[in-house]
Amino acid sequence: MDGGLVQDPSVVMTKQTDIFEKCFKFTAADDLRRAGVYPFFRVIESAQDPEVILNGRKMIMVGSNNYLGLTNHPKVKEAAVEAVKKYGTGCAGSRFLNGTLDIHVELERKLARFMRKEAALVFSTGFQVNLGVISAVVGKDDVVIIDKMDHASIVDGCRLSYGEVKRFKHNDMADLDRVLSENGRGKLVVVDGVFSMEGDIINLPEVVRIAKDHGARIMVDDAHGIGVLGKGGRGTAEHFGLEAEVDLIMGTYSKSLASIGGFIAGDEDVIDYIRHFGRALIFSASPTPASVASVSAALDIIESEPERIEMLWKNTRKMLKGFKELGFAVGPSETPIIPIIVGADETAFKMAMLLQEEGVFANVAVSPAVPPGKALIRTSYMATHTDTHLDTVLEAFGKVGKALGLI
């Protein structure tokens, strides 16, 4: 008894947990900063060209997804400027209500024609496309089947759906067949066309064959395929001659299309359903006028200047050959995304900073972006890189690779 108050024995005092405690305990980034090998959030002071300015110093950029070199193209920039002059800087609402401009509709028609589909629908980011489409289409009685190396936006779209999620081994068609055989419900197979870290291409002919055998629909995330694969730059489906066999094709603007945003293309009825049930579309502000106009101009350039794709592949072949001759492991890459597999995270961090000292900007990928123990330097190439740029990059990689004992 204390002060006339008796403590109720049924009340058990428990220590309260601060939800921010995990934030205060997170030290990995600071550890890397102190060691001088923190490779993230580096500040670029110029356009995403083959050469960029970092800390006032000119660098060769081999970490950009600007595959066709259009982000600084005069026609693309001029289209953005004119759109801002006419429509302002934003739409102040969602597509569902007041945020649909005539240029949104025009771009959707243009994308549908370009992708050889009945209809298309534009979103504010590529990430939102996968969130909105998968969660709208896959219901509680359905199952969505994804490659284990699919992009994070696909994984998160699956999480937002009420359906069951099944994974198959990366690009393993026998495992896809096994997973599909186990399910008799409505099925959607979602795969990357080009895998963003590995640089390999999905075995789409087999995906189509197996999916059709099991009555499954197919969606291809072609963020890294559009503008890169196919004679006309229409992506993985065109590359394999399977455009009519793929039900939904997703694309982003932040790679070959020189802007930010994304789209889904497919049958009119399916696109209209997504238009009315895709929460990522309905509850997000619509793409800015500048973004929409930029994409439209980029599409025009892709169709009028096919030599850009040819130059991109010339540079890709040169770098694949060059890295292999140096003795680097590049995995299954067969696209302008060429990973240099180094193994340990620490080695990847050191390598990125040593490359920076040599005047080369390249990206680092560690777990969970790649499997543990498979850290890599992710390089990617543009149509606008010159042989001089590429020779300098190979020389830098050779020097750093030897210094780290990788080659």
Image (tube, rainbow, N blue to C red):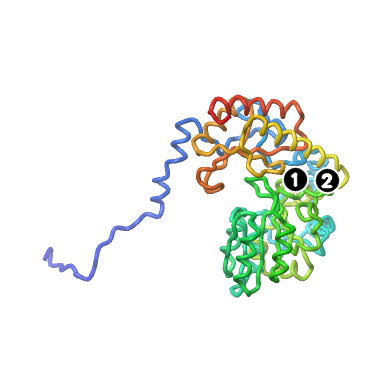
Is residue 78 rendered to the left or right of residue 22?
right
Name the residue at 85% across, 40% down.
Answer: 307
Circles 2, 1 touching at the beta carbon (< 8 Å):
yes
* Quadrant containing the C terminus in the rendered view: top right
Dot 2 amino acid type: Ile
- Closer to the camera, 321 or 68? 321
Is residue 221 rendered to the left or right of residue 298?
left
Is residue 405 in view?
A: yes
Q: Examine the rendered structure and indicate whether residue 78 appears above or below residue 327.
A: below
Q: CA distance from mark 2 to mark 1?
A: 9 Å
- Lower sequence index among marks 2 and 1: 1
The circle on residue 83 is none
Query: What element does badge 1 sit on?
Result: loop
Q: Examine the rendered structure and indicate whether residue 157 appears above or below residue 341.
A: below
- Closer to the camera, 203 or 53? 203
Dot 1 crowding, Cα within 10 Å, few <14, some 14–19, many 20+: many
Dot 1 amino acid type: Ser
Q: Position of residue 266 (x, y in %)?
A: 77, 64
Q: Position of residue 215 (x, y in %)?
A: 70, 71
Q: Quadrant of residue 53?
A: top right
Name the residue at 66% across, 49% down.
Answer: 195
Dot 2 crowding, Cα within 10 Å, few <14, some 14–19, many 20+: many
* Quadrant containing the N terminus in the rendered view: bottom left
Q: Position of residue 75 (x, y in %)?
A: 83, 41
Q: Quadrant of residue 164?
A: bottom right
Query: What element does badge 2 sit on?
Result: helix
Residue with the mark numbered 2: 302
Name the residue at 75% across, 61% down.
Answer: 121
Name the residue at 79% across, 36% down.
Answer: 314
Is residue 261 in view?
A: no
Residue with the mark numbered 1: 256
Residue at the farthest right position: 304
